[in-house]
Image (tube, grey):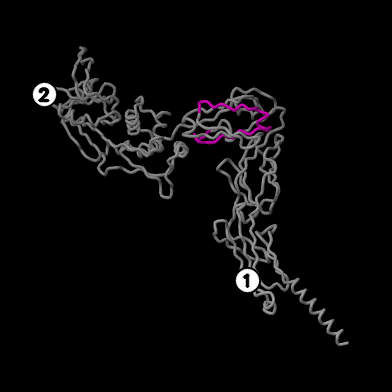
Amino acid sequence: MLLGVALVIFVILALVIVAIFAFSGVTLASDSTALAHVTVQPFGGTIEHVQAFGPDGRRVPIAVQDGRLTPLRKLAPGEQVSVDVEVRRPGWLSWALGSQRSEHLTLSAPVAQVTEPWMTVRSGAEVRVSFDRPVSAVAYGSKGHTTVHRLGTAQRTISLGAQPETGATEIAVAARPWETVGAPTQVSWFPPSNTPVMVSLPAAGTHISPATPIYLTFSKPVSEVLGSSRPRLSPSTPGSWHEANGHTLVFTPTGLGAALGSQLQIQLPHAVSVTAGSGSGSSSSGGGLRTTSQIAWTVPPGSTLRLQQLLAQAGYLPVDWQPAAGTAAVARTPSAEAQAAVEPPNGSFSWRWANTPHQLQAMWSPGQWSEITKGAVMKFEDENEMTVDGLAGPTVWHALLDYAIAGKRLNSGYSYVYVHREVPETMTLWHDGQTVITSPANTGISGAETETELGTFAVFEHLPETTMSGTNPDGSHYKDPGIKWVSYFNGGDALHNFDRSSFGTPQSLGCVELPLAASAEIYPYTPIGTLVTIEK
C-alpha cells in the first residue's frame, strides 16, 4: 500500500518537473511586423534585458511591447542586426536551471522588391506598381529627386496615378514603418504596341548636365531590339554603355562628360517607337507613338556664376570666392566639376584688396556678364594659347575645369589702368593692391572723331613695338614706325609711347599717349585681358 502511494507521488512529481521544464522555455524569432519576437513560456521568467547591434557594432535602441522588439531608429532594408535577450528565471526554479537564460538571433531587415519593372499600360490607365511583400513607405520621382510617401497601412500594390503614355521613374520602398526606403529601382511602362517601345531617363528633349547618365529602357529585351549593336552619341562623348538589366542600356559619361552648350544626340541602330515628339526624324506609327532612330537632349552652357567662381579660384579676377558655410567645396573630379558648371554651388565673393579702385568695384556683378569677366576670360585664353575672343566657349570651359581639378592658380597678379580725361590728363596703373605709377597722359583731341571714347575696355593686343597708320583729322594719312610699348584696348585705341613736347592735354588721335619711361614701366603690367577705363 505504502509502495503504491509512493509510486503515485513519484509519478506526479516527475510530471510536475517535466511540465516545469516544458513550460519554462524562451524563443526568439523574426516577426511579421516588428524586428523580432521573444516568447517566454509561463515558467520561463521575465525579460530582464534586450540589446541589439548593427553590423558596425553600433547599438540599435529597441522598444519591447508584448514581446515584440521594434527598433527606435530607422534601419536600412537588408541591414543586419544582432539581437540578445536575457530572461531571469523565477527564484524557485533558478536552483535547477540557473538564474538567467540568454537567446541570440541575427537577422536582416526585410527587403521588398518590385515584381514587374517593365509594364504594359493602356493609354489613360493609372500606373500601378506591385511588390513581393507589403510595403509601408514608397518614394518615387526622377533620379536623385524622389519624394517619400508614408502609407497608412502596408500595401502590396501602389498607384502612381495617371502618367504619360510612356515613362520611367525611380522607385524605392520600405517594407516596415521602422525602415528607411531602400535602393531605388527603375520602373518603366509602355503602351501596347506591335513594335518595340523605348522610354528614356531623363526624358528626351529635356536639359541634362554633362555628367548625367542616360537610361534607355525597351519594352522587349535589349538583345531583341538592338542585337549586338550599341547607340552612337554625337558629339562624341567619353563614357561607356552597359546593360543594367535585360531591358535597359545605360550610358555613363566619364571625364568631363558631354560638351557644355551642346545638343547631345543618340543614333539608334534600329528604329523604335517613342512617345510623339520624343525623337527627331520620327514618323507616325499610329496612336500616341512615333517611330524614330534618333533622340536628343540639351546640355546647357556653363553658368556665368560658376565661370566667375572658377576664374576667381584661378586668380584671374580681383575677387576671391568661398563656398557658403555648410556647403562642401566642389570635389576635384571631372564629374563633380562638370555638374557644378551648370549647377553652381552657393558661396560668396570678396575683394582681394581693401583699396580696390571704386571704378573696378562698380563694374562687378556676380552672375552677370561684365567687362571684368570678359577681360579675365581673355587673359585666360591668352595664357593658355587659345584664340582670344573673350567668349567662354567649350574649349575655355574644358581648360578651366582642368585648372580646377588640378588646383592651379595664376601667379602674375591683377592689373587695372584708369585714365582721367580732365586736364591735366593722367594715367594710373594699379596692381595687386598698389598704385604702381601715375603719369601725365594725352588722350584724343576733344570734340573730334578722334576723341578717346569713355568706358572700360579689355586689352586685346600687346606689342613691344609696331607701326601705326591711319587718317589725320584734315584727311591726310600718317604712318609712324617704331611706336613702342603698345597695348590696344578699343579698336584702334592703345596705351603707347609717343614723343611729345608735353603731356597732360588732349593731343592724340584717340590713343592714350605716354612718356617713354612711363609706357615702358606699365607695359609688363598690361597683357591681354587687362582692363582700361577712360573716365571724365
Residue 48 tag number: 1
Crowding at mark 1 (Cα within 10 Å: few <14, some 14-19, many 20+)? few
Separation (CA) of disc 2 from disc 1? 105 Å
Q: Residue 79: where, in percent of width, then height?
A: 60, 53
In the figure, residue 271 lies in which quadrant? top right
Asked if residue 492 lies in the magenta stretch, the reply is no
Q: Quadrant of the C terminus?
A: top left
- The reply to whether the C-beta atoms of the residues labelled 2 and 1 are less than 8 Å apart is no
The residue shown at (62%, 49%) is 149
Q: Residue 168: where, in percent of width, then height?
A: 63, 37
Residue type, numbered disc 2? Ser
The stretch in magenta equals 207-236
The reply, left or right, for residue 279 in relation to residue 350 is right
Residue type, numbered disc 1? Glu
Q: Residue furthest right?
A: 1
The residue under label 2 is 501
